[in-house]
Image (cartoon, rainbow, N blue to C red):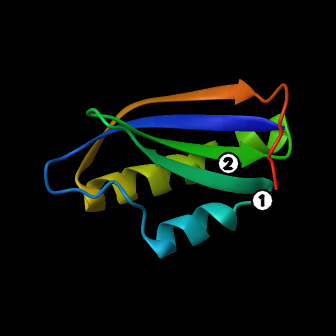
């Protein structure tokens, strides 16, 4: 599995929360396994998307960039960075 982590700086009038439309658009991308949005206690927030494979991660870049740009503008957030990772382990407790 692979992950894309985007770092944002929300504006003073931004909740940092994605719209339902944004979440659905991301989840509809081929190979997307899930999405997390994290609001920091400081001046940054993160989104983490999970992907089946490196190929689906790479194949989603153009669409993800467009969604990220549109949602950031609508939510008054600045995109600080985007990084990609291989997920080496995963454990969620039920």
Which image quarter is the N terminus in? top right
Left or right relative to 12: residue 42: right
Left or right relative to 10: residue 48: right
Q: Secondary structure at mark 1?
A: loop
Tags 2 and 1 touching, CB below 8 Å:
yes
Q: Secondary structure at mark 2?
A: loop
Could you give the CA–CA distance between mark 2 and mark 1, rounded to whole angstroms?
7 Å
Which image quarter is the C terminus in? bottom right
Which residue: 77% across, 35% down? 2
Can you say whether 7 is above or below 16 in the image? above
Which residue: 61% across, 61% down? 26
Can you say whether 52 is above or below 4 in the image? below
- Please tell me how many numbered marks the rendered image carries: 2
Which residue: 58% across, 47% down? 62
Left or right relative to 93: residue 36: left
Dividing the picture into quarters, in which one does residue 4 lie?
top right
Left or right relative to 15: residue 53: right
Q: Earlier in the sequence, mark 2 or mark 1?
A: 1
Which residue: 38% across, 60% down? 17
Can you say whether 78 is above or below 74 in the image? above
Residue picked out by circle 1: 30
Where residue 33 sits: x, y (%)? 77, 55
Where residue 75 sits: x, y (%)? 28, 59
How many residues crowd around disc 2 within 10 Å: few (fewer than 14), some, or many (20 or more)? Answer: some
Where residue 10 sits: x, y (%)? 26, 45
Q: Furthest residue to the left?
A: 12
Numbered badge on residue 13: none
Residue picked out by circle 2: 60
């Amino acid at each position: 599995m692979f992950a894309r982590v985007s770092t944002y700086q929300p504006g003073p009038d931004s909740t940092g929360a994605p719209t339902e439309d944004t979440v659905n658009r991301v989840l509809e991308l081929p190979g997307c396994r899930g999405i997390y949005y994290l609001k920091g206690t400081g001046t940054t927030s993160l989104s983490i998307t999970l992907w089946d494979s490196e190929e689906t991660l790479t194949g989603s870049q153009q669409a993800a960039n467009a969604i990220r740009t549109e949602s950031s503008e609508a939510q008054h957030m600045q995109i600080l960075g985007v990084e990609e990772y291989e997920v080496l382990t995963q454990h969620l407790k039920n």
